[in-house]
Amino acid sequence: MFSNQDLVLDNFVKKTSALPSWISGAHVNENQYVIAVDSGLPSDTFNVLILLSVLPKDALTNVEEAICSFSDKGFPVSVWTDQRFLTDELVALLTDLGLAEAERNATMKLESDAIKTVSPMHSDLFEIKKVLNADDVRSYAAIFQSLFEGSPEKEVLIRLFDQAAASFSAHPHQQWFIGLLDGKAVSTGCLIETDSSYGIYDVMTRQEYRGRGLGSTMFGYLLQRIKEEGKGKPCVLQASSDGINIYRKAGFHEVGEMVVFE
């Protein structure tokens, strides 16, 4: 049976591995210690190494080899680890390989029967729809890419999502949603289902449309879908310091911490 922390980790692995499964040239390598997700493009957003346990000293080479496989191609990579797995030896290795701690996110959980019913935002102009085709993928991607204006990462993400759109196939365990304001895609949200949980990800709003409650409406919508369709599975997510109070108010409680190196 999964611990609360392992529920979050298991869902995050599923989410991180999902998009590359659509893309030509991307692949996922896994052993008992780490999962390496390679998008085939120079993106530390989608080139990810996830630790699955505390590494014995003789297994640190798994991490070193995985990181070097990216650096040999000139690709950046981010390393994600549950705080439980963070050891002095691991930190020393990542430092030697040129990576430094970039952020920490609280891992959080809410039982589905504790999800509060949220009144939808009343607006004839705002609607939420599920991503169902390649054009919807591109609309979703445009919001994601808008977070990287002025960065070389944006051009990489355009290439990545163009490939994803070309090979898009709706999957019941990975659901993307876009929020439309007066017909324009302005917000996003994502649900990932595993055998044991639902995960909420990518709740984003275009900069120029923030402060109108659109992100909160998307978040509430995702929670209601879990409450109605989630088969009693708990909901998990990761929260930055900026968003943690929103999730606490919704009933989520902290179960651990995820540490990111870049």
Image (spheres, rainbow, N blue to C red):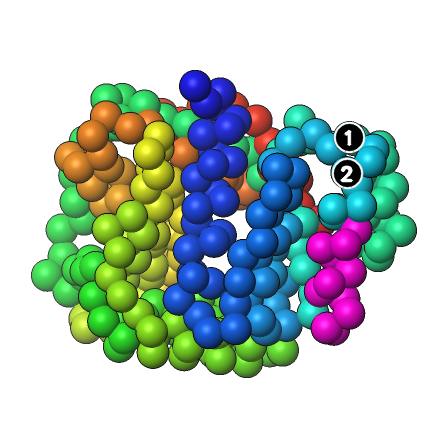
Q: Is residue 105 left or right of residue 184?
A: right
**Residue at horizontal 64 percent and vertical 31 percent from the top:** 53
**Residue at horizontal 49 percent and vertical 20 percent from the top:** 3
- Pick whichever, 198 or 141, lies toward us: 198
Whether label 1 touches label 2, CB < 8 Å: yes
The reply to whether the magenta stretch includes residue 67 is: yes
Residue 162 pos. (x, y %): 41, 79
Q: Is residue 24 above or below residue 47?
A: below
Does the rendering let one see residue 181? no
> Dot 2 corresponds to which residue?
59
Residue 145 pos. (x, y %): 47, 71
Give the secondary structure at mark 1.
loop
Give the secondary structure at mark 2.
helix
The region drawn magenta spans 64-74
- Quadrant of the rendering where the N terminus is positioned: top left
In the current view of this chain or complex, which residue is farthest to the left? Answer: 124
**Residue at horizontal 57 percent and vertical 26 percent from the top:** 256
Number of marks in picture: 2
- Quadrant of the rendering where the C terminus is positioned: bottom right
Badge 2: residue crowd in 10 Å (few <14, some 14–19, many ≥20): few
Residue 132 pos. (x, y %): 21, 66
- Our reading of the magenta stretch's main secondary structure is helix
Q: Is residue 239 above or below residue 165?
A: above
Q: Is residue 183 left or right of residue 154?
A: left
Distance Cα–Cα, label 1 vs label 2: 5 Å
The reply to whether the magenta stretch includes residue 239 is: no
At label 1, the amino acid type is Pro
At label 2, the amino acid type is Ala
Residue 52 pos. (x, y %): 61, 36
> Dot 1 corresponds to which residue?
56
